[in-house]
Image (cartoon, rainbow, N blue to C red):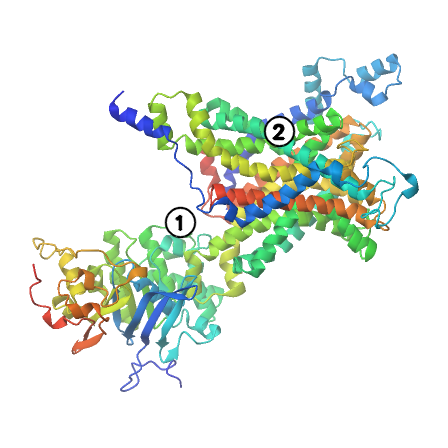
């Protein structure tokens, strides 16, 4: 039996993670030059683990996700590194094998359900498509499964709704359809690209709870891309922070939030409003993230960092373990906990 | 499902003033002739008595508006007049000619789609690359070729040189009709394809870049199943209007093609009527063709409604 | 009038440029190719009296139906006329008539469409209905009948084509005007007290004409195809004037023996259309990049 067919959770002492990104570098090739958008990204996701990938717009988090899903936009290539799923090389496997994984193993929930759903196809059929292709279900069986899934994700009156087209449903319902579609073949890894950003705040919480519950029930691993820290606390157990195409910090969510080990993470926390402490002064991070084309030579955060030292601009700090289960890419990580220089 | 067609009666109502306008144009087409139509029919050598008699017979001595209403009245009873050259009711001539032209047009449409859909798909698959450029070159050249000349070239290559197809005519049985209509239909298809390819290619490129195709790919769809299941129907939507508009142009083109291939349809009827100055027939054919275009327009909207569930044409009618 | 309104109106007087291509025209490959082809054709047409080796209408029955040879590069037709000379002189006719035929529908259609779009109301409704009536007739049906009714000849061709094609310009301009009149700078101009005429004439027109111009290029192609078709049907420019369409008609009789007589004039039309298409596409890229349908 290959590693793919046996769940790592049942293997005693299994060490093969479900998903492993190894120094992944993504970018464009422009006439002999390389423009790197995502650089040297390491990411490990174990079975059933829920990992958040946090960063602001332009940090490269969505692109990283798309690389895992095999949906890189035209022009963007893998410039270096690798992605392994349950020990198999995702980037070099034959296309047919990759397609066989899309659905039963790796599934994706997109950000904007209005454009991510086929406007001319009934939503029930769209949910049923995966099971028909991958699980070999008949049309009727797949349709029944679709209705069941719709009930599972909390859509009222599913038989009638299954015959609707996307534009007839509200944003929240559409996103639930997307989720139903994604879990329809029982994937082991669910990739979510800011699935709640386009939704009303009230609906966001419901959808997040749904995702959390689904993953907990089925043991599905989750990679959740977002720019919203609050969302991460809700759904994920672990977290990786991205800045300017690099991973700058990883660790369990709670610990990372109480004791950040990277200046950028600390800056994010200090600039984010917190309903539990409404009187806390918000401290914005000065400056702007660098343009993809002019990333600085050393640490990418150096120009905006309050802890910067001369050696920070020479070479980018590697992502290193700074405490058990915690990694940070910073030369000055030991100084976090100091007050920032005025 | 049928409730989606609620807009049709409204659309038909909207078509009425257009049809009226058409009858006016058709009527005045003939009366624009300088001089006397009767004289034109009989020729310069006719005697005054004969001219006056024909004048009276054709009702040409009535005031113009009265003539128009007589004309309209006849139309509503299905009387299209008597052909001057054949001395038979025009409606008879038209009813024999319509199926011929209709078969030609439908055949041409089918061939055009068979030609265009794969070519557009190939071009859209890798825009900017070799295959795309080849297809676009084909459309550019295709748009610049006179239709009748294409017909003559096909005749030359496939009928005269290769002897694979007949040089003209319509054939006797239903089966042989297809055989005889192939070259003319192909000619029309070549003329129609560039427009379809351009539109379909553009919308396919659009669709391929859309998010929902990304979703489909994340479910493992690819190749033909992706194309058929997700791309084609969405890409076809804007193209349907293009096809509908060009169908009218196609009928006009068939006029000339029928002459090239000696096909006994509306086109030949019209052309012969023109040369023999057979006014009733000219008017009748023009009218029938215009009606066809109007009907095609409504049918296009119907197809459009069924293709795109987001569209609700009935709602617009109320606005 | 407040100072702000005056200032806004003054700003409106400086017309905003529609997005133009950043590339200079001479770097636009399509445009240059089009210009070269059309330029060469126009040159040939203009220099016909000097380029053509023979008189295009002079008959020489003894030399009829000769194959291409040293003295007659493309052979002779059934009346002994040199095909090459007729081809060169035919360019004069077809190009001239093609270019001229666009003018009336362009002007008339654009004006009607612009007025319909700008003023709206009943005028708009009436104009659009009339356009619909004309559109109900397939292009060739109406052209053929009108030419027949008006009598064969150049003037009839202009009139028939004008009647059939003005509608497209009207629709284009109407669409453009509907969008343009809502633009802030137009509203500001009107607020500044400028009359409708001034706003339309000096401000809106230069911006919206480009679309009509681009369509006009493809319309020239359509017109040339129509003229050639009319010539083929015997309804075009009267013989013995050399014209590509009637040349194809003459040549069709001898398709088996002298196939080049029917083929070459058609190729000439194709080349002309290609040149004009490139010119039109290049112009479209130049004037409004990304807008080409």
Crowd rating for badge 1 (residues with CA inside 10 Å; few <14, some 14–19, many 20+): some
* x and y, in percent, of residue B93 in the image: 79, 35
* x and y, in percent, of residue A265 in the image: 18, 64
Which residue appears farthest toward the front when viewing the image? C50
Is label 2 on the same chain as label 1?
no
* x and y, in percent, of residue A150 in the image: 36, 60
Q: Quadrant of the C terminus of chain A?
A: bottom left
Query: Image quarter for residue A197?
Result: bottom left
Q: Chain of mark 1?
A: A
* x and y, in percent, of residue C63 in the image: 90, 43
Residue C253 - label? none
Q: Nearer the viewer, residue B173 or A238?
A: A238
Q: Nearer the viewer, residue A263 or A282?
A: A263
- Above or below, comparing residue B202 to residue A265 in the picture: above
The residue indicated by pointer 1 is: A167
Q: CA distance from mark 2 to mark 1?
A: 37 Å
Crowd rating for badge 2 (residues with CA inside 10 Å; few <14, some 14–19, many 20+): some
| Residue C145 in the figure: left or right of residue A174 | right
Q: Residue at x 38, y 63 (%)?
A: A181
Query: Image quarter for residue C154?
Result: top right
| Residue B184 in the figure: left or right of residue C118 | right
Q: Quadrant of the N terminus of chain A?
A: bottom left
Visible in this render: residue C109? yes
- Above or below, comparing residue A309 to residue C125 in the picture: below
The kind of secondary structure element at disc 2 is helix
The residue indicated by pointer 2 is: B19
- Above or below, comparing residue A332 to residue B144 in the picture: below
Query: Image quarter for residue A298?
Result: bottom left
Q: Residue at x 51, y 49 (%)?
A: C27
Q: Nearer the viewer, residue A152 or B271?
A: B271
| Residue B300 in the figure: left or right of residue C91 | left
């Amino acid at each position: 039996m290959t590693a793919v067919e046996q769940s790592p959770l049942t293997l005693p002492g299994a060490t093969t993670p479900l998903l492993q990104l190894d120094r992944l570098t993504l970018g464009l090739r422009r006439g002999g030059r390389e423009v790197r958008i995502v650089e040297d990204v390491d990411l490990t996701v174990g079975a059933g683990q829920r990992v958040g990938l946090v960063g602001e717009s332009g940090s490269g988090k969505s692109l990283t996700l798309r690389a895992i899903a095999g949906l890189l936009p035209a022009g963007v290539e893998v410039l270096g590194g690798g992605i392994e799923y349950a020990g198999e090389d995702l980037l070099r496997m034959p296309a047919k094998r990759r397609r066989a994984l899309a659905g039963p193993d790796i599934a994706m929930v997109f950000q904007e359900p209005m454009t991510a759903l086929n406007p001319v196809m009934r939503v029930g059929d769209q949910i049923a498509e995966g099971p028909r292709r991958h699980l070999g279900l008949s049309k009727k069986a797949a349709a029944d499964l679709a209705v069941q899934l719709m009930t599972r994700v909390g859509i009222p009156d599913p038989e009638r709704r299954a015959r609707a087209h996307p534009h007839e449903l509200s944003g929240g319902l559409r996103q639930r359809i997307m989720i139903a579609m994604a879990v329809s073949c029982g994937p082991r890894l669910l990739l979510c690209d800011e699935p709640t950003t386009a939704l009303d705040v009230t609906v966001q919480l419901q959808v997040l709870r749904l995702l959390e519950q689904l993953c907990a029930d089925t043991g599905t691993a989750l990679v959740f891309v977002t720019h919203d820290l609050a969302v991460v606390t809700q759904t994920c157990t672990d977290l990786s922070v991205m800045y300017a195409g690099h991973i700058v910090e990883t660790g369990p969510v709670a610990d990372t939030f109480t004791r950040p080990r990277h200046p950028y993470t600390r800056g994010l926390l200090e600039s984010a409003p917190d309903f539990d402490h409404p009187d806390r002064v918000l401290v914005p991070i000065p400056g702007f993230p660098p343009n993809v084309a002019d990333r600085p030579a050393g640490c990418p955060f150096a120009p905006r960092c309050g802890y910067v030292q001369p050696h920070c601009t020479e070479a980018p700090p590697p992502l290193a373990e700074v405490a058990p289960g915690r990694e940070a890419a910073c030369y000055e990580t030991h100084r976090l906990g100091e007050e920032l220089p005025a | 499902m049928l409730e989606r067609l609620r807009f049709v009666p409204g659309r038909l109502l909207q078509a009425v003033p257009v049809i009226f306008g058409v009858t006016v144009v058709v009527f005045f087409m003939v009366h624009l002739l300088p001089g006397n139509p009767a004289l034109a029919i009989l020729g310069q050598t006719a005697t005054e008595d004969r001219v006056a008699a024909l004048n009276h017979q054709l009702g040409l001595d009535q005031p113009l508006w009265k003539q128009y209403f007589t004309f309209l009245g006849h139309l509503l009873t299905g009387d299209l007049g008597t052909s001057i050259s054949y001395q038979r009711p025009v409606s008879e001539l038209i009813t024999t000619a319509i199926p011929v032209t209709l078969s030609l047009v439908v055949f041409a449409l089918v061939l055009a789609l068979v030609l265009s859909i794969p070519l557009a798909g190939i071009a859209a698959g890798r825009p900017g690359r070799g295959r795309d450029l080849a297809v676009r070159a084909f459309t550019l050249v295709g748009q610049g070729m006179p239709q009748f000349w294409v017909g003559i070239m096909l005749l030359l290559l496939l009928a005269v040189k290769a002897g694979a197809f007949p040089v003209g005519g319509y054939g006797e049985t239903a089966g042989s009709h297809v055989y005889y209509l192939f070259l003319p239909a192909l000619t029309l298809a070549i003329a129609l394809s560039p427009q379809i390819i351009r539109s379909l290619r553009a919308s396919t490129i659009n669709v391929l870049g859309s998010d929902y195709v990304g979703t489909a790919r994340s479910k493992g769809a690819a190749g033909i199943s992706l194309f058929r299941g997700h791309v084609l129907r969405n890409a076809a939507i804007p193209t349907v209007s293009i096809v509908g508009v060009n169908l009218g142009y196609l009928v006009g083109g068939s006029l000339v093609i029928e002459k090239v291939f000696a096909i006994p349809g509306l086109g030949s009827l019209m052309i012969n009527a023109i040369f023999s100055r057979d006014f009733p027939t000219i008017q009748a054919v023009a009218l029938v063709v215009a009606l066809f275009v109007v009907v095609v327009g409504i049918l296009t909207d119907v197809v459009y409604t069924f293709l795109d569930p987001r569209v609700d044409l009935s709602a617009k009618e109320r606005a | 009038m407040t100072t702000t309104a005056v200032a806004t109106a003054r700003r409106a007087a400086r017309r905003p440029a529609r997005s133009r291509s950043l590339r200079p025209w001479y770097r636009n490959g399509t445009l240059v190719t089009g210009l070269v082809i059309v330029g060469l054709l126009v040159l040939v047409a203009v220099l016909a009296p000097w380029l053509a080796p023979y008189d295009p209408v002079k008959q020489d029955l003894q030399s009829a139906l000769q194959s291409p040879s040293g003295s007659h590069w493309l052979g002779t037709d059934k009346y002994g006329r040199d095909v090459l000379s007729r081809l060169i002189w035919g360019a004069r006719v077809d190009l001239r008539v093609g270019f001229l035929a666009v003018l009336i529908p362009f002007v008339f259609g654009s004006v009607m469409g612009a007025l319909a779009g700008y003023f709206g109301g009943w005028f708009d409704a009436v104009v659009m209905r009339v356009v619909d009536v004309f559109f109900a007739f397939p292009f060739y049906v109406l052209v053929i009948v009108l030419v027949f009714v008006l009598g064969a000849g150049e003037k009839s061709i202009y009139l028939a084509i004008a009647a059939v094609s003005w509608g497209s310009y009207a629709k284009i301009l109407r669409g453009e005007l509907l969008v343009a009149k809502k633009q802030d700078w137009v509203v500001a101009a009107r607020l500044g007290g400028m009359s409708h005429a001034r706003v339309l004439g000096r401000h809106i027109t230069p911006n919206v004409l480009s679309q009509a111009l681009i369509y006009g290029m493809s319309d020239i192609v359509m017109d040339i195809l129509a003229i050639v078709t009319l010539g083929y049907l015997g309804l075009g420019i009267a013989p013995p004037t050399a014209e590509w369409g009637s040349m194809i008609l003459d040549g069709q009789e001898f398709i088996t023996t002298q196939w080049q007589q029917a083929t070459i004039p058609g190729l000439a039309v194709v080349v002309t259309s290609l040149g004009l298409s490139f010119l039109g596409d290049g112009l479209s890229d130049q004037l409004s990049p990304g807008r080409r349908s």
